[in-house]
Amino acid sequence: MALERMTVARTEVPAALKRKRRRETARTLAFLSPWLIGFGFFFLYPLISTVYFSFMRYDGFTAPVFTGLKNWDYVFTKYPFFWQGLQNTLWLVVVMVTLRVAFGLGIGMLITKLKTGVGFFRTLFYLPYLAPPVAATMAFAFLLNPGTGPVNHFLGKLGLPQPGWFTDPSWSKPALTMLAMWGIGDLMVIFMASLLDVPKEQYEAAELDGAGPWQRFRYVTYPNISPIVMFAVVTGVIQTMQYYTQAIVAGKVASGIIGGSGQAFEPGYPHGSTWTLPQMVYSLGFQRFDTGSACVIAVVLFVISMAFTSLLLRRNAGFLSSED
Amino acid sequence: MTLSSTLSVPLTTRTAAARVARRRAVLHWVAVHSVAVAAALFFILPFVFVFLTSVMTDRQALTTDFWPHQWEWGNYLKVWRTPGFLTWWRNTLVYAGLGTLFTVVSSVPVAYAMAKFRFRGRNLSLMAVISMMMLPPQVTVIPMYLFWAKQLHLTGTLWPLIIPMAFGDAFSIFLLRQFLLTVPNEYLEAARIDGCGDLRTLLRVVLPMSRPAIAAVALFQFFYCWNDYFGPQIYASENPGAWTLSYGLESFKGAHHTNWNLTMAATLLVMAPVIVLFFFAQKAFIEGVTLTGVKG
């Protein structure tokens, strides 16, 4: 009898467990459902479709035709802007990302050193980050315009050379870099938080050992904040892969070709110096109706972005930690 | 006497040392604040010049004089009355308002499940969210455009940008998850013992505690929509009746391409709402930025 009861219990427990587990799975799926649909429909499906179209000739009107590697060949060997766009992107990664991180760190350190007016200065330094990119680019297109812009006016008064900024192929990327440094607020806040987390005792110990300001930075500050610097660099690279609005708006304004719809502005002005990959997707896909080649660029963009994202996931374990 | 003399010697040296230290502190203060003021000029002067130009007469806007001879406040009225400006304003509010609402409602339960439920594929789902977050929108835009144009005939409107936000936004999910990880499990267990189901626990216990994170997510999403240029360019450019402020702004330069004054007035009018909103919600915003970057 006792044995019977035991067997009953033994068969019942797994059944109850199974039911509980099934209920838990249903609950998880229910909570995740908006995103599961979104992930499938707005991520997986278009991603597969993009790869598919990269092997097709398709103008958006007639039925797509399979053409093998023809689009890939076109983009890599014939499309005149592809390598130039990659070069520009590399320039932006090396110069713009580096300067942004260094400047953001500098401004963050400056704020933590302030004794009075911290809130005032922090708000002031943060504000430009909030300016909508189109508006900020418009503002800089005005400030840096060679005709009436105040920057060149003052440079002239000081007897300095007056570059053409957005209208000069060798100055357009430096001008975009200045615009990017103006909107440093996000990095400033992140660096500020991490600088305040550096244990005070370590500074005191370093000071007792006679460490100067540079040594304190090198041996106390930097080791403590290096994961955040790494995070800022990698997300900076990923953002540069998406660099679009500022480049296209600056080119439009400086070239004078602005039409809402219809009138075609070929991005990259001046002389292709501001071409980036995302603009090529727009230009090829929506201006030239060459869907296949646009999708080739999109796939390249995807591969580069995901390569850096995986770096982010590996290097910065805190970013991914799921302990609770 | 001996006592006071022995005391007085170290006392005077101590005050001398203190004086040197104080002088050094004052010099340090002056140096640091001078740098801060110089940096402040870099950040604020662009706004100042944009503003000064926005109130110039058409004729003065063609010169390099930066101080307005005559304050032309009517420029703002002119911008306001430009055909289409009010429509862009309304479209932007609809896009940003509905987009924010949809994002918050759809992302909170997802983030909650990812932070607090144990299930197989939990880490995988997180990696998928981060991948989505880092994906340039241009990668998926062509198939999405074809879908909205050919299946639903919704191009020329902002719906192709608003509707997807009802299916969770990767960045918002990630930010909310980071916050929800810090909510102690004891609260959830207490709610369960009190007989709350999962949904009730989320609505009654977790939501009130997550107000700062939800405010941050809402603000970020509102700003994202407000600032979005690529989305409206792709889906709304064919129909000026569906343009947003960010997209419409550049057409000012096209319409007034000799004078910068009206363009700059329009630029400030597009910047103003986000800056005003920021002043009302500064704390939530800065906490949100910190939350996305640093974890533990």
Image (cartoon, coloured by chain):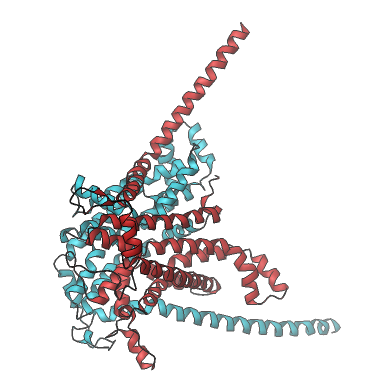
Chain colours: A red, B cyan
In this picture, is B205 found above or below B280? above
Instruction: Please give the count of numbered marks on the rendered protein.
Output: 0
Residue A246: x and y in percent read 33, 69
Q: Nearer the viewer, residue A209 or A290?
A: A290
Please state if B145 lies on the left or on the right of B278 as rendered: left
Residue B111: x and y in percent read 43, 45
Residue B45: x and y in percent read 37, 80
Residue at 71%, 76% in the rendered image: A210
Please state if A306 lies on the left or on the right of A67 as rendered: right
Please state if B105 lies on the left or on the right of B146 as rendered: right
Quarter the N terminus of chain B occupies: bottom right
The single residue placed furthest to the right in the displayed view is B2
Residue at 48%, 47% in the rendered image: B180
Quarter the C terminus of chain B occupies: bottom right
Q: Nearer the viewer, residue B173 or B54?
A: B173
Regarding residue A317, the answer to whether it shows in the image is: yes
Please state if A81 lies on the left or on the right of B295 as rendered: left
Residue A152: x and y in percent read 34, 86
In this picture, is A164 found above or below B84? below
Q: Nearer the viewer, residue A76 or B18?
A: A76
Q: Nearer the viewer, residue A19 or A316?
A: A316
Residue B52, picture quadrant = bottom left
In this picture, is A174 found above or below B180? below
Residue A180, picture quadrant = bottom left
